Image (cartoon, rainbow, N blue to C red):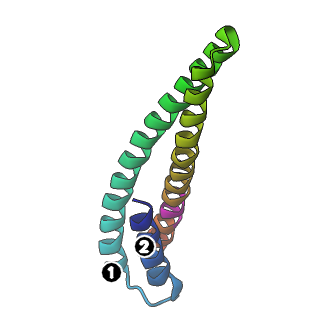
Amino acid sequence: MEKRIKNYLAYMKKLTAQEGALQAGDAAEIMKDLLIQIHFFQHERLVHLIVTAVFAILTMLVFLGCVLTSQRELYMIVALLLVLLVPYIRHYYILENGVQKLYEYYDILKEICSK
């Protein structure tokens, strides 16, 4: 998904980079496609937010278990969960920033359509 959003952001940057190159009709068609892509990425972002939150809560609960019981096995589980949590946070960060950037492109296209 990271590759897909980065490719789509590059595509939108290329389309909107040339001022005056887009006509209002073209911008309207691109806006329709952009809204569909935003919807897809928002869904993906929601799924990853839920997964990331569950992993973070699970990590905190296991860490609390470590503190209370001092079992070495739990420390290994915490380490494993932290190793998994870092990529989830990174991926969510990329999705979040990508969707925010897509909102900016939507605003640009909306401005072109209103001219």
Neighbours of disc 1 within 10 Å: few (<14), some (14-19), many (20+): few
How far from the left and from the top, in percent, is residue 102? 48, 63
Q: Amino acid at mark 1?
A: Asp
Where residue 48 appears, as percent x and y from the top left, is 44, 42
Q: Note whether 94 is above or below 3 in the view shown.
A: above
* Depth check, front residue: 25 or 106: 106
Q: Report the residue marked by disc 1.
A: 26
Mark 1–mark 2 contact, CB under 8 Å?
A: no
Residue at image mark 2: 7
Specify which label sits upstream in the sequence, 1 or 2.
Answer: 2
User: Mark 2: which secondary structure?
Assistant: helix
> Measuring 39% from the left and 57% from the top, which residue is drawn there?
38
In the image, is 68 to the left or to the right of 55? Answer: right
Residue 86 place in picture, x, y as percent: 58, 45
5 and 42: which is toward the camera? 5
Q: Residue at x 52, y 24 (%)?
A: 58
Q: For the stretch drawn in magenta, what is the main secondary structure?
A: helix
Can residue 82 be found in the magenta stretch?
A: no
Examine the image and state in which quarter residue 40 appears. Answer: bottom left
Q: Residue at x 57, y 22 (%)?
A: 73
Query: What amino acid type is highlighted by mark number 2?
Result: Asn
Measure how far apart labels 1 and 2 are at the Cα level: 20 Å
What is the magenta range?
100-104
Residue 96's x, y, as percent?
53, 52
Q: Is residue 61 visible?
A: yes
Count the numbered circles shown.
Answer: 2
- The label on residue 42 is none
